Image (spheres, grey):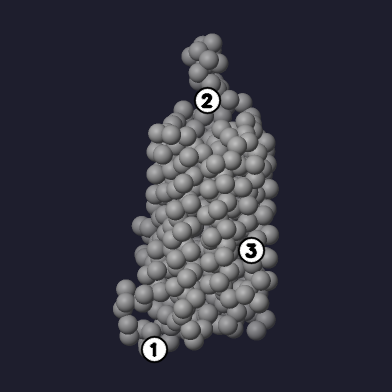
Amino acid sequence: MKKNHFAVVLIISLFFLWGFALNLNPILIPHLKKACQLTDTQSAFIDSASYIAYFLLAIPAGKFMKRFGYKGGIVLGLLLFAIGSFLFYPAAHTRSYVFFLGALFIIASGLTFLETAANPYITVLGDPEGATQRINFAQSFNGLAATLAPFLGGMFILSGNSLDAETQAAMTPEQVNNYLATEADAVKLPFIIIGLVVLLVAVFLMRTPLPEIQEKEEDEAGKVSLWRQKNLVMGVIAQFFYVGAQVCVSSFFIRFSSHVAGIAEKSAALFLSGALLGFMAGRFIGTFLMKFISPPKLLAVYSVINVFLVIAAIVLAGKAAVYALIGVEFFMSIMFPTIFSLGIRGLGSKVKEGSSYLIMAIVGGAIFPVIMGRVSDSTNIQTAYIVPAVCFCVIFYFALTNLKIKGVKMGTAH
């Protein structure tokens, strides 16, 4: 039992690491938009480079773990994470947007292995009845990372300087080039530090024994094709739309705050950090509420609230619209882990394979921001928030379908 407790602590630290990496994207989007002189649509490919890896590598990651175990998947994920972080240095030196996207893809490839391993691993390390609460608790530390990432990123990466057309016209080509080079160089040291920290965690994990969870070779769930598991299929769809909504809400938050309320980028980064503090608090509060309210019911209530909050952000003006988006972050908090846990329940021996499909659904974060960027370029960033509003409607439907499922335990077979 003590070994399992130590394993839980170690796995929870991974939730923090990948949460920090992914939540630097809202800082990188406005930063590289300046440094590489991009449109909103082009800057959205920062998210695409990150989240497309989940689609391409989730199933290979599941197969890798089936052969080498959870620990093997975690160590490989950390090594890829570190390599991608170190590649930010040459990407900034050359100021190549494609290079940056490549480095982000490698980081996200590592995160795919980490998430494919850690999300199901935390659900099976303990009592099956507490699986949803356990994964929500672990994801709370992902929320802590989400709070710190924009705060530290805003402090050490964003310069607070803008380069509008009028200012650029008054500068010499050399001055413009020096300005852009300085902006790009700001990411070098932060990502070197991230890479070193991740590498140290990888070395530590390689030297630490972790209990391998052995699922049964075959059970009743294992005899049925995963594609005939309706709840898993619905969970994959819901996760696809949820991650799309989450990335859209957070990644364009700084642009939204500037457009709607005239908030400067450094101040907007602080607002975002505060919003993600609410996201973290929401996970702890949600974990507590699940002692009294069933996870599907809480998911349904939160998704409806978010539909109305996003609509408020679209129709309101000034800081009121920004505060509405901050509220969205709080009510998004339980969605990923709850959809994940509901999606894999009852899969028995096929939990690793089912988890791979749910992680693959994270590709929604690559697709919806590009759609939102196109809508923003065609109209404005405020109107573009209709995209996450539609996503929350899909999540509400998934929650309703789970309210009708009776007698299935929230955990997975050991």
Quick one: label 2 or label 1, which is nearer the N terminus? 2
Q: Which residue is disc 1 drawn over?
A: 219
For the image, the number of numbered tags is: 3
Type of amino acid under label 2: Leu
Query: Does residue 191 lie above or below 6 as drawn?
Result: above
Q: Badge 2, how many Cα within 10 Å: few under 14, some, many 20+?
A: some
Mark 1 or 3, nearer chain start:
1
How far separated are the C-alphas under marks 1 and 3? 33 Å
Residue 351, horizontal then vertical, whole percent: 43, 77
Q: Are marks 2 and 1 in contact (CB under 8 Å)?
A: no
Mark nearer the viewer, 1 or 3: 3
- Name the residue: 55% across, 82% down: 128
Secondary structure of residue under mark 1 = loop
Q: Which residue is mark 2?
A: 180
The answer for how far apart the CA atoms under marks 2 and 1 are is 59 Å
Look at label 1 and name its amino acid: Asp
Q: Nearer the viewer, residue 384 or 72?
A: 384
Residue at horizontal 65%, vertical 39%? 319
> Looking at this rendering, what residue extends furthest in the bottom direction?
219
* Residue pointed to by mark 3: 283
